[in-house]
Amino acid sequence: MNGKIKALKWTATALTLTGILTFYLDFYPYSMIPHSFGILCWTAAGIITKDKPLLANFSLQIPIIIAGVIKLIFSSN
């Protein structure tokens, strides 16, 4: 199980950093996709490992991403 957690964390890291990079390279709204998956992976890792600081950071980003998606949907109409 430890190897799977490590792989999940590295995947989450790569996705989150890819999302941040694409945001700063001005690929919005596409930057939301890898960043969202990174947030979900980090939240899953926090749940599996019962890491409360990790959960506090990434699970609280989920509503922020949802708010951004809602804003994107309503601003594009």
Image (cartoon, helix red, strand yellow):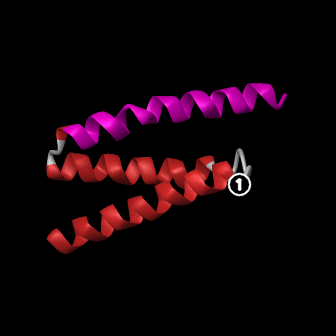
Tell me if residue 1 can be seen: no
Q: Residue at x 26, y 53 (%)?
A: 45
Q: Residue at x 27, y 39 (%)?
A: 55
Q: Write down the residue under mark 1.
A: 25
> Main SS type for the magenta part?
helix
Which span is picked out in magenta? Answer: 53-77
Q: Is residue 59 magenta?
A: yes
Q: Is residue 7 above or below residue 27?
A: below
Circle 1 packing at 10 Å, graded few (<14), some (14-19), many (20+), is few
User: In this rendering, would 15 be left or right of 60?
Assistant: right
- Tell me the quadrant of the picture where the N terminus can be found: bottom left
User: In this rendering, would 33 be left or right of 47?
Assistant: right
Q: Is residue 41 above or below residue 52?
A: below
Work out which residue is located at the far right of the displayed protein and give it.
77
Q: Residue at x 46, y 64 (%)?
A: 14
User: In this rendering, would 52 be left or right of 41?
Assistant: left
Q: Residue at x 32, y 64 (%)?
A: 8
Q: Is residue 65 magenta?
A: yes
**Amino acid type at mark 1:** Leu
* Residue 39 percent across, percent down from the top left: 42, 47
Badge 1 element:
loop
Tell me if residue 7 can be seen: yes
Instruction: Name the image quarter holding residue 73.
Output: top right
* Residue 65 percent across, percent down from the top left: 53, 35
* Residue 5 percent across, percent down from the top left: 23, 65
User: In this rendering, would 27 be left or right of 69?
Assistant: right
